[in-house]
Image (tube, rainbow, N blue to C red):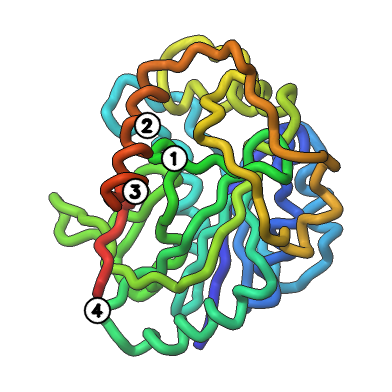
Amino acid sequence: MKISGFTFLRNGQKLGYPFVPSIRSILPLVDEFIIALGPCDDDTEKMLREIGDPKIRIVPTQWNENIRPDYSVKGFVYGQQKTIALFNCTGDWAFYLEADEVLHENDLPKIRAAMEKYLDDKRVEALAFDFVHFYGNANTIAWSPGWYRSEVRVIRNTIPAWSSESLFFNVVVSHKKSRQPRAIHTGATVFHYGWVRSEAQMNLKSAASLKYWQNRPSVAVNYAAVDAAALKLFSGTHPKAVQDWLPKAEGIFQADPNHQLTARERKHRRMLWLEEKLGLCFNKKHYRLIR
């Protein structure tokens, strides 16, 4: 069994991505790691090469700056870059890890075991993971229907698949049709640190990426402007690969007590209440679970 890892990246240093810890966390699992690297004006490429692992293969790419943002498929340029990296994978499984996502070393045996177990089970096209989204600091997680709780990160590399945006995979059925992949859950977790970077870096990232998602000016990010009901204290351990990168902090992140809930936050609060009281689950996912 051969395992490929892959991601795409551009100006990761300047935009505050923990891409080096991310890559280091997956290297013990994979036989190769493909990076579709777009044009950078920082030290991202230098930092990648300094990792010094022969498993890493950098594929230089260009970003299509002319994709119109008025179509229903948003973030298509991100999907293009993800797909370029996927199409350079040579393994039986292809593991997509975004540049602000990190694997816990304790989960690696579990992930490998799932890949070995389902390698010859053609019904299983993908492997899904739980997600933990850190918010504001390393001690706080965001937990509500507004934050996806599980998603596919591994796709079988022997089926026709691509990505129309960075979050999910499209399995091609015909030249006119695609569908979500059929997946099993690994029981492993992906740790997402995108909302731990500084507000200044998050604002740079938002300004750089918004044009690929929608045609409007970026709005300044204020971490404190959040529904406190969606924040929980993290009680686990962080992956070893990311511990030196994490900013030091004490206690749960403090939301602005005067924050006025948005319509979206009010909706998610109602959904969260229904989940807690009625045992419902409003988890949005882009795969069909095989039971």
Q: Mark 4 points at which residue?
A: 123
Spatial CA distance of label 3 from label 2 is 11 Å
Judge depth for marks 4 and 2 and give the one in front: 2
- Kindly state the secondary structure of the residue where label 4 is placed: loop
Q: Do the residues labelled 3 and 1 touch (CB within 8 Å)?
A: no
- Kindly state the secondary structure of the residue where label 2 is placed: helix
Q: Which mark is residue 268?
A: 2
237 vs 278, nearest the viewer: 278
Spatial CA distance of label 2 from label 1 is 7 Å
26 vs 12, nearest the viewer: 26
Name the amino acid, label 1: Ser
Residue in the picture at 51% in, 10% down: 217
Q: Tell me if 152 is positioned left or right of 209 in this view.
A: left
Mark 3 / mark 1, whichever is N-terminal: 1
Q: Mark 1 points at which residue?
A: 144
Mark 4 / mark 3, whichever is N-terminal: 4
Few, some or many C-alpha atoms within 10 Å of disc 4 (few <14, some 14-19, many ≥20)?
few
- Kindly state the secondary structure of the residue where label 1 is placed: loop
Spatial CA distance of label 4 from label 3 is 23 Å
